[in-house]
Image (spheres, rainbow, N blue to C red):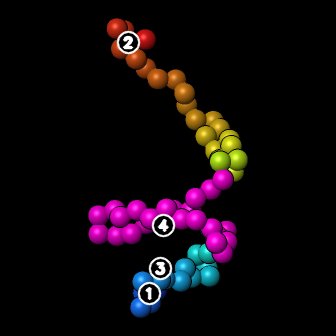
Amino acid sequence: MEAVKISPKFQVVIPRKVRESLHLQAGQRMQVIEYGNRIELIPVREISAMRGFLKGIETEVDREGDRL
């Protein structure tokens, strides 16, 4: 885990090791989520990059007899 410092403009620098492992690029958009007492940054990916990410997921759902 690496620590970062908040600048006077409330900016933070993502450490190089993290940027490289997540393949982040300058100018890339991030979603910011407040989760409990922490902040999560989630990279926004192109929809085309998401193609096939659910490959192999189980799609069968057991339903009750009175449901379609």
- Decide which of tag 3 and tag 1 comes sooner along the chain: 3
Residue pictured at 52% horizontal, 23% vertical: 60
Viewer can see residue 37: yes
- Decide which of tag 1 and tag 4 comes sooner along the chain: 1
Residue range of the region highlighted in magenta in the rendering: 23-46
- The amino acid at mark 1 is Lys
Q: Residue furthest left?
A: 36
- Decide which of tag 4 and tag 2 comes sooner along the chain: 4
Residue 59 vs residue 23, the one in the foreground: 23
- Decide which of tag 2 and tag 1 comes sooner along the chain: 1
Q: Of circles 4 and 2, which is in front? A: 4
How far is mark 2 from mark 1, CA to CA?
A: 54 Å
Instruction: Tell me residue 2's x, y (percent).
Output: 48, 83
How far is mark 4 from mark 2, CA to CA?
A: 39 Å
Looking at the rendered structure, the secondary structure element under dot 4 is strand
Instruction: Tell me residue 63's x, y (percent).
Output: 40, 17
Q: Which residue is mark 3?
A: 1
Q: Which residue is mark 1?
A: 9
Q: Which residue is mark 4?
A: 41
Q: Of circles 3 and 1, which is in front? A: 1
- Decide which of tag 4 and tag 3 comes sooner along the chain: 3
The answer to which quarter of the image holds residue 55 is top right
Looking at the rendered structure, the secondary structure element under dot 2 is loop
